[in-house]
Amino acid sequence: MSDREKIRQKMQEKGIDFLLVQFVDIHGSAKVKMVPVSSFDDAVDEGAGFAGAAVWGSGQGPHSHDMLARADLDSYTPLPWLPNTARFAADLYVDGESYPYCARTNLKRVLSEARDKGYIFNVGMEPEHFLVTRKEDGSLEPWNPDGADGLSKPCYDFRSMAPAMDYLQELTTSLNHLGWGVYQADHEDANGQYEVNFDYADALTTCDRITFFKMATSQIAKKYGALATHMPKPFSDRTGSGLHVHFHLADAASGKPVFDSDSDKRGLGCSDLAYHFVGGILHHARALCAVTSPTVNCYKRLQLGSGLQSSRSGFTWTPAFVSYGDNNRTQMIRTAGPGHFEDRTVSAGCNPYLALAAYLTAGLDGIERKLDPGEPNLGNLYEKPLTEILESGIQILPQSLWEAVQELRDDSVVQEGLGPIAGEFLDLKTQEWETYDTQVTQWEVDQYLTLF
């Protein structure tokens, strides 16, 4: 039986009546066309058509030919909150040709290039997110139905988490029925903030799952009177949300990891290949930042030092230095185990397909050029004086979207990771910064109205 017929049989058994053919815009936002299950073959072979210029970053204008989203059979995902409907992640086509402005197609291109070099990119992502409600004046506050989630340090706290257990258990059960391997969930460092962790997979599968996770949280949270948001920093005085990336390369032929080593002189259990990959990430880190932290709001999270002024808990938990270390959360990249790295700077607001395509390209550049990341940083970077850090040669990650975009303009390797999307991305992010920069905020009115 063909894969198509196997999926068709599964849908019949589950009583699937409708399909969501889902793609993403340049921001990583899920976009869909709904089609009846009777149009399944058309969705796979031809695709669901739409006007490309109606979504951000498509590379199309109102005169362009129709864009079609073709369902990927491997991404079949029944909707837990709508049992008669299934989601298929889709790749974009125009005039019958694969469309290079598709973020998912672009990631597949980079993954194929890595495979040609002998590598598979395996990734786990940790989606932090908030549950919030709107007050009568339209402002946000953390979802807090029984008033117990008010601690300055609510991370892992039972009473703070208890009201969200029904939400987290329904989310966990739903995702495990899909075979995701959710193995833990917790209350994070900010009031109303949660994280759900699920198994490693290849980079494409993980991106498809992160996109679906955002769809699922938005719908399941509504049942509990909350709005789920993956906005990086919805509250100025609380920790922001990351999408921490755990990663390693594996051998394309055997599937075995190639980042670990028993003879690591640095004592972290990592191979030379792993260090070269990290060397590439650090070398391109400031340009990568534009892709992994691609919104104005991301830089309210990505701050120097411990961020004592911007988090009630005392820490932002977001390193802002271009560094790596041992199992040390003050570093951009920590070594979470032999051959296992975690980048803690990646923002919840990124497009995961673009972020991982750029990230892998930078890492492979490090392997090709045998870039050395230097010795690991073992101390607490939050406590070191800035002058001492800079004198040691450690760079600071961009502190605004504008600064990051300028770095990306000058980095041809990271742009290559984005393919033709790079130009569209740079234009859109420049416009985003310029629009933001002309706004007059309430803080400015409060600060300056009667100052002079």
Image (cartoon, rainbow, N blue to C red):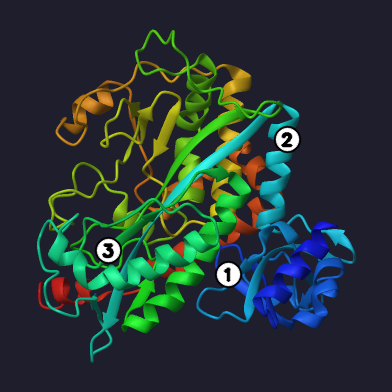
What's the distance in space between the residues labelled 2 and 1, CA to CA? 26 Å
Q: Secondary structure at mark 1?
A: strand
Q: Is residue 104 left or right of residue 169?
A: right
Give the distance between the C-alpha atoms of the residues marked 3 and 1, in whole angstroms. 22 Å
In the picture, residue 148 is in which quadrant?
bottom left
Residue 115 percent coordinates (x, y): 71, 33
Q: Nearer the viewer, residue 99 or 193?
A: 193
Total count of labels: 3
Give the vertical position of 430 relative to 245 (above or below).
below
Q: Are marks 3 and 1 in contact (CB under 8 Å)?
A: no
Among all residues in the image, which is located at the extreme bottom? 136
Q: Position of residue 420 (x, y in %)?
A: 71, 51
Q: Residues within 10 Å of mark 3 (few under 14, many from 20)?
A: many
Residue 206 located left or right of residue 198: right
Q: Amino acid at mark 3?
A: Gln
**N-terminal-most mark, 2 or 3:** 2
- Farthest-out residue, right: 96
Identify the residue position indicated by label 1 in the image.
Answer: 30
Which residue was labeled with disc 2?
113
Of the 4 image quadrants, the one containing the C terminus is: bottom left
Element type at marker 3? strand
Please tell me how crowded label 1 is: few (under 14), some (14-19), or many (20+) other residues with Cα within 10 Å: some
Tell me the amino acid under the disc marked 1.
Answer: Ala
Q: Could you tell me which residue is drawn at 25 percent across and 46 percent down? A: 317
Residue drawn at x 18%, y 48% is 315
The residue labelled by disc 3 is 193
Vertical arrangement, residue 28 with respect to residue 318, above or below = below
For residue 79, which quarter of the picture?
bottom right
Asked whether the viewer can see residue 70, the reply is no
**Dot 2, crowdedness within 10 Å: few (<14), some or many (≥20)?**
some
